[in-house]
Amino acid sequence: MYYGADYNPEQWPESVWPEDIVRMREAGVNMVTLGVFAWSRIQPDEDTFDFEWLDRIIELLHDAGIAVDLATATASPPPWATAKYPEILPADENGAAYWPGSRQHYSPSSPAYRRLASRLVTRLVERYAKHPAVVMWHVNNEYGCHLPQDFSDSARDAFRKWLRERYESVDALNEAWGTWFWSQRYTSFEEIYPPRRAPYSHNPCQLLDFRRFTSDAMLDCFRMEKSIIRAAGATQPVTTNFMGPFKPANYWQWASELDVISDDCYPDPNDPESFRTSAFARDLMRSLKPDTPWVLMEQSTSALNWRPSNAPKAPGQMAALSIQAVARGADGVMFFQWRQSRAGAEKFHSAMLPHAGTGTRTWSEVVQLGADLGSLPQLPAGAMDARVAIVVDWENWWAVENPDHPVEFDYLAQVQRWYGVFHRQNIQVDFVHPSAALDHYQLVVAPHLYLLRSADAANLAGFVDDGGHLLVTAFSDVVDENDQFRPGGYLTQLGSVLGVALEDFGALVPPGSSGPGRKSARVRFEEEAFNGTYFAEQIQTAGAEVLARFTSGYNEGAPALTRNHAGAGQAWYLATVPDSSGLGLLIGQVLDAAGVKPVLSNLPESVEAIQRGNVLTVINHDDVPAAIDMSGTDLLAGEAVDKVHLGPFGFAFIAGHAGPPNYSAAS
């Protein structure tokens, strides 16, 4: 189990380094990420490289038994680079440059940037490829975090090249983009620009392709650096740090390029429900590469610096969130950063070793977490045996949030709502691409799969035919991969397996909007009722059974929820977006039909339970103690138990649990 942080010794005099090593050993640190933002220290000018300081700190760490995740330092070009090669700088949609003085001020498509970055990485890897301290390579840092899209001339040229490779001919591009509309017909690739600022709406397929290009451009930078690392003979795993559900980068494509998935995650202590969004990110990271444990590369020990209000974590909360990552498949718990900065934009960002020193609660919790992680046996790797999958498709995400739709909504927020219902019931969930093998699952939920490729539709239909339960929600199966309607209208691919036909989307005024219009449609489901939002679609059954109907509005009496038996399985269609009570009602029935059971039941809202192999982890995300009747071996205490007591933000690893648990409130 890796335990440590980003370490930035270049920010401190060398006289501090020995103390850092002593404190790291005291905290149980066994790996640090080194050099993430050290380009200007490693290469003070174009013709000079200084590795002596890096040699010294790596040797100090190695002598202390602390491994190094060595960064390639390419995330923040030094001032000399942008002064000498201003074409490195990216631009916004107005064509205005993003200037130096922060970080990520480079165009991923810039030939000058790629040349300088390649030279830096080559020299770095030649020197340290065989060093025994280096156990992992950390390429760049948080690709796209502060620059999700670049509209520079470098991006323009690269975008044109990317389009040539994708479409081969300008006629094929015109067909895909539907350019007869608004007289957008192109006669040459040289006439095409990134979707810079325009008087009105852009071509939707152009927007979609520019999203694809942007993700690919950043991924090409990663591939470039990884190829240099491998060419130098380095055999250590190569990673770069993801950022949970990050829209600009298609992580399904990226995952196959990384040897180990790593993630940065910063839940907000001001939000009592933030442990659910962090659980979402953990499960997503595990799902990207399900047979390989991942690493929580960055988190905070306490307060941050970049929110309007940066609350500290409550006593024990840092450990609880760290253990959540371990329970959901991580084999590493890291922080940003080791020693809190004394200067710069992130000087208020908490660290393992805070400004206030070792007499602090933060330090004592850091030491205790290191001891707890160090005492754990090796945990099982591989899949988590989830029986529920949620379909997440980045290209659909990009397309569904394009403008000019019946109604605007946040795709990620809706996916997280579905996940949250399962999380509250301690139902383990995997995330899947719509093309993934689904035979392991009993239930697959596909929220708002607006863009649906033919092969993916066939995969989902095959899952139902083979006996699976598929739940499809409103605004799904609307367009193809070019964001164009298929002949025949909507639900042209899944309509037969769902047993319904869709006539109109019935857009409602989004919740929270102050504008006029209908904001919800009442739905009757068995003996209960709930509000439908965003859509009140007009559907007709074509063999499906009606389970719920609209009881208000234009669709009064029309189907709102249907179920169809297809092959050996069942396919459900929901023609609206239910409120919270509706989500719970629907998921309860679908879970019963699919035969899916929770990891543990009858737990309080604040306690989550996660199964990782033969180890069951229970975590209390509240400051109110809880006790759970369950038997097994407490791995941290090293003793058999028949009741687990969880203090505020407490946790336990239990091996060998058998039988249903019962929750009892702690006194």
Image: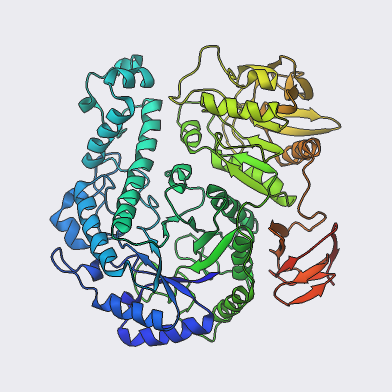
Q: Is residue 576 above or below residue 307?
A: above
Residue at 42% x, 43% y: name it: 248
Q: How is the image coloured?
A: rainbow
Q: Quadrant of the C terminus?
A: bottom right
Q: Quadrant of residue 651?
A: bottom right
Question: Looking at the picture, does residue 222 appear above or below residue 402?
Answer: below
Percent x, y for residue 463?
66, 30
Residue at 40% x, 26% y is 204
Residue 250 location (% of width, % of height):
45, 42
In the rendered image, residue 18, in percent from the top left (x then y), is placed at 38, 87
Q: Is residue 145 left or right of residue 394?
A: left
In the image: residue 31, left or right of residue 437: left
Horizontal and vertical percent position of residue 309:
51, 62
Q: Quadrant of residue 164?
A: top left
613 over 369 or under it: above or below: above
Horizontal side, residue 373 vs residue 159: left or right: right
What residue do we see at 80% from left, 63% from top? Answer: 657
Residue 407 appearing in the image:
yes
Tell me what residue is drawn at x 75 percent, y 39 percent. Answer: 587
Q: Nearer the viewer, residue 249 or 201?
A: 249
- Side (left or right) of 33 relative to 477: left
Using the image, determine if residue 303 lies above or below residue 232. Answer: below
